[in-house]
Amino acid sequence: MNWRTYFYNGTKIHEYENHGKFSISKCYKALREPIAQVRLKRLLCNNKASPKSLFITWLDVLNKLATKTRLAQWNLISDTTCVLCNDAEEDIQHLFFNCPFLSDIWMQCLNLLGISRRPMAFLDEISIAASKCRRKSNRNQLYGMLFAEAIYNIWLQRNHQVFEGNHKLPDQTVDLILFNVACRIPDSMKKQLCR
Ligand SMILES: [Zn+2]
């Protein structure tokens, strides 16, 4: 089966051509970007988390954060080991939320919302958060805010460890996340953040 056959069934093949030849990169972008944009739009629009946390979440979802794995791809470093657990490659999937030193942060946030589960793979977490952010209830609004603040504060802790050689304990980071969220919601919603 050639690519013309593969994309038959109503797909506009010429959209994936470059000077008359099939372009894998054009096809990949066409397939990937609408999904990422929809998820990003759901995650970020109407999310009342702090602008800096929304910015880092935006970079994170697009895999634009300067993780060690990405720096190594640019030949800027050679050691890609996670500085927190020293037991895995540092990429976004590991930091959010597989690293044993960081997974507890998101799990505690979930527990606060009455959700008892361990963090899943990052793409699954993005899908869940984007789906929650579509709905307008207080709980779903809190979910989106906690998700963005968790990503921002995890990235901060990673940077503290890389550049200063220390980081906060998960409990302290969760306190910080809750404080940042509490500052941006009405009093009536704050009781849902009590530990
Ligand atoms: Zn780690």
Image: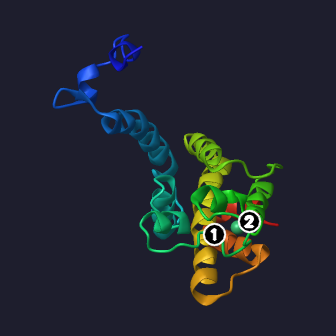
Residue at image coords 53%, 72%: 78
**Residues under numbered marks 1 and 2 in contact, where contact means CB atoms less than 8 Å apart:** yes
In this view of the protein, can residue 131 be seen by the observer?
Answer: yes
Q: Which residue is mark 2?
A: 105
- Mark 2 Cα within 10 Å, few/some/many (few <14, many 20+)? many
58 up-or-down from 51: above or below: above
In this view of the protein, can residue 185 be seen by the observer?
Answer: no
Q: CA distance from mark 1 to mark 2?
A: 8 Å
Q: Secondary structure at mark 1?
A: helix
Residue at image coords 80%, 51%: 118
Q: Secondary structure at mark 2?
A: helix
32 up-or-down from 10: above or below: below
- Provide residue 158's location: percent of width, then percent of height: 62, 75
- Residue type at mark 1 is Ile
Image quadrant of ligand 1 equals bottom right
Q: Is residue 73 left or right of residue 29?
A: right
Q: Which residue is mark 1?
A: 154
Tell me which corner region of the image, top left, top right, bottom left or bottom right, holds residue 111: bottom right
- Provide residue 22's location: percent of width, then percent of height: 28, 28
- Provide residue 187's location: percent of width, then percent of height: 66, 65
15 up-or-down from 176: above or below: above
Residue 133 or 40: which is nearer the viewer?
40
